[in-house]
Image (cartoon, rainbow, N blue to C red):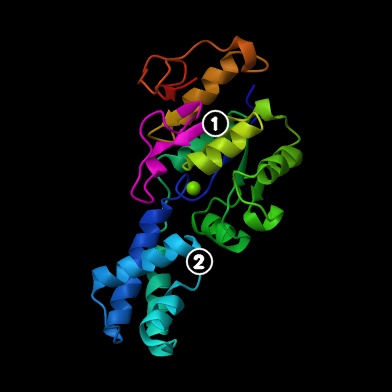
């Protein structure tokens, strides 16, 4: 029986990369307006190279670019970048389609909800408030709460402790196979791969490659998955589960509401 759903935040609930990309482009325009001597594409590429190296949450990306280019901070250009970034960020952070209706529907069905994010605590809470999701989740577990990032077991164990639920009562939803899926699976938590959020970097995960129990193209498919698992009765999994199609084939007629069922 699934009693609670754990969600990754960025690129699972929020379209984080769309926000990031818009904010970076606005920052680059503002910096060029203040005298940055790069064309927009070159500046964009250099900023993303810094993110690739330091992580997508890195907070000093413009400082780094300016030091690399000029050997100093150039506060006139830095200020333009920061302000351009902030203005665009606030207007571009959005939820994926059907996120809010799906969360509300899960709550109506009596499921408990939590977030497990590798983002810093303040940034995660800011994003939740900005999107008016701050009251939806019983627990928000961030990097700052355990000092460990997924796929380490600590954040998942913390969720189990706080909810007081065993692994087989949980379902983890995320966009990053190596972190969100493997981390949960290592503790016996069933997984749903948010294929729609898998847009960061050049390589996309082919159907089935996530290794998740289910793969969805829209978060709304989660309702059918939860209903399907909970129809199977107490335990919800173990030996009682009917065999689904293996290998990521579409199965619109399955109890999992059309989501790809694997394993
Ligand atoms: Mg994510």
Horizontally, residue 39 falls left or right of residue 156, namely left
- 16 is within the stretch colored magenta: no
As rendered, which of 114 and 116 lies closer to the eye?
116
> What secondary structure prevails in the magenta region?
loop
Look at the image and tell me in which quarter the N terminus lies: top right
Label 2 lies in ligand 1 vicinity (Cβ under 8 Å): no
SS at circle 2:
loop
- 195 is within the stretch colored magenta: yes
- Residue 69, horizontal then vertical, whole percent: 36, 82
Q: Which residues are magenta?
A: 192-214
Answer few, some or many: residues within 10 Å of disc 2's Cα (few below 14, many 20 plus, some between 14 and 19). Answer: few
Residue located beneath label 1 in the image: 191
Horizontally, residue 160 falls left or right of residue 90, namely right
As rendered, which of 217 and 238 lies closer to the eye?
238
**Which of disc 1 and disc 2 is earlier in sequence?**
2
Residue 5, image quadrant: top right
Residue 160 in sight: yes
SS at circle 1:
strand
Q: Residue at x 45, y 79 (%)?
A: 63
């Amino acid at each position: 029986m699934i009693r609670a759903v754990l969600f990754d935040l960025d690129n699972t609930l929020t379209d984080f990369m769309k926000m990031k990309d818009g904010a970076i482009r606005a920052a680059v325009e503002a910096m060029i307006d203040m005298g940055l001597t790069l064309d927009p594409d070159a500046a964009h590429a250099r900023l993303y190279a810094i993110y690739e190296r330091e992580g997508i949450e890195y907070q000093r990306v413009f400082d780094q670019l300016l030091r690399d280019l000029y050997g100093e901070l150039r506060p006139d250009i830095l200020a333009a970048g920061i302000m351009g970034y902030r203005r665009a960020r606030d207007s571009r952070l959005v939820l994926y389609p059907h996120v809010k209706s799906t969360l509300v529907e899960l709550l109506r069905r009596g499921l408990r909800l939590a977030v497990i994010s590798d983002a810093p605590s303040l940034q995660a809470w800011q994003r939740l408030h900005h999107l008016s999701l701050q009251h939806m989740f019983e627990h928000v577990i961030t990097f700052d709460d355990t000092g460990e990032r997924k796929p380490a077991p600590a954040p998942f164990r913390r969720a189990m402790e706080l909810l007081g639920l065993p692994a087989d009562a949980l379902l983890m939803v995320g966009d990053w196979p190596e972190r969100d899926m493997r981390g949960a699976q290592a503790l016996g938590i069933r997984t749903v791969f948010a294929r729609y959020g898998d847009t960061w970097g050049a390589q996309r995960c082919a159907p089935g490659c996530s290794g998740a129990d289910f793969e969805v193209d829209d978060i709304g498919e989660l309702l059918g998955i939860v209903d399907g698992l909970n129809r199977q009765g107490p335990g919800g999994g173990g030996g009682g589960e009917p065999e689904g199609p293996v290998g990521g084939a579409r199965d619109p007629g399955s109890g999992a509401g059309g989501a790809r069922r694997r394993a």
